[in-house]
Image (cartoon, rainbow, N blue to C red):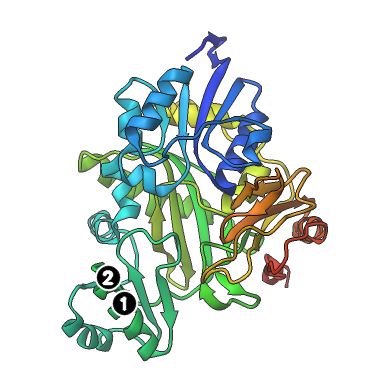
Amino acid sequence: MSGVVAGKVVDVRVLVIGTGGREHALLDALARDPQVTELHAAPGNPGTAAIATNHQVEASSGDEVAALAERLAADLVVIGPEVPLVLGVADAVRARGIAVFGPSAAAAAIEGSKAFAKDVMEVAGVRTARSEIVDSPASIDAALDRFGPTWVVKDDGLAAGKGVVVTADRAAARAHAADLIESGRPALLESFLDGPEVSLFCLVDGEDVVPLLPAQDHKRVGDGDTGPNTGGMGAYAPLPWLAEGAVDEIVETVVRPVAREMVRRGVPFSGLLYAGLAMGSEGPAVVEFNCRFGDPETQAVLSLLESPLGEALNATATGTLGALPPLRWRDGAAITVVLAAENYPASPRKGDVITGADGAGIYHAGTALDGEGRLVSNGGRVLNVVGVGDDLAAARADAYAKLDRIKLPGSHFRTDIGYQALQ
């Protein structure tokens, strides 16, 4: 690192890999850390360009990312998306002797292969849904008979949060499984887990675990949890309805056993381990693990963090997480609302001009500059709008007031993010 004064790292150059709202939020939080003096993003987006230097590289190329990190003399590389992690970009950067926040390709299989994750959980004694892999069209009907009356059908690999169908319609479940198998990807059938869902992010390095604030994502595209699954339409944190001690229970019964089992297998996890859980009558059960910060929960969670983010990520990356001081959080609540392009999550329209997308708490997720230098839509989830307040009602009011000022033809957003938690 650039230097150490009184036990603290100073003058840190950080490179964040990714293009979306999660990466914009990570850079924004890193910019608030006085120890971080230089920020770079690759590839970044028009929003990150305001707080970091953008570099055009292929984020999934270990060679390109490692070469850029070396050229910048980066002290810490933070990898945002799951695809580069699963493809081993963190390994390529570590091979150059540069600290990386993000797991190895072998450890990233906790997200990249649901079958691997299920095996780890079974050995670790962690509660999760009963599951079955189906890789032949002839096996679909018999497998469906063993599940239901609510069917959960998932893509066994990475699907950006959109490879899941949860339905009481057997024909819809069968169609999704058949589509996956026809495209050469195994389908994973799971038993349905009851109870509200919780997203818990944990900094993990080997067997050391530090939880962040719990959050809740809203996956369905429409108000009242209607319509198809998306990459996430909004989130809020913390969770006023979550029982006291629930985070400690999740850490001790879910995250730490999985971390220990991965160490035992010789694939220790280092980075952000995301546990998506159903809080049912029998306690927490794992819906999924992710090997990185969740999107859009990150935007809300980091808005409440008062501790220096660079220090926490660097401690994780350098094996000193166990010595990290307790994280500090501001009182109150935060919510993220996703502004999506017309026709998302099907085939989103691109190239529409965006106005009013400036100011604090607005993170770029799918934006670009056109030939005239105007901000335009360039993806399905275009902007993440974050509201913060003394309570959830105030945070909601703040976020939706910001949304009212943003104009994007044909765009849509959910009006009920965090609403049920208020009832």
Q: Is residue 271 left or right of residue 119?
A: right
Identify the residue at image location x=32%, y=74%. 190
Dot 2: element: loop
Tell me the residue that label 1 is attached to: 179
Tell me the residue that label 2 is attached to: 183
Looking at the image, the residue that sits furthest to the front is 371
Q: Which of 239 and 407 is in front in this view?
A: 407
Whole-percent x, y for residue 145 in the image: 26, 89
Report the amino acid beneath label 2. Answer: Ser
Dot 1: element: helix
**396 up-or-down from 132: above or below:** above
**188 up-or-down from 32: above or below:** below
Identify the residue at image location x=20%, y=87%. 142
Distance from the alpha carbon under mark 1 to that under mark 2: 6 Å
Q: Which of 36 and 46 is in front in this view?
A: 46
Report the amino acid beneath label 1. Answer: Asp
Quadrant holding the C terminus? bottom right
Whole-percent x, y for residue 51 in the image: 66, 32
Q: How crowded is mark 1: few (under 14 residues within 10 Å), some or many (20 or more)?
A: some
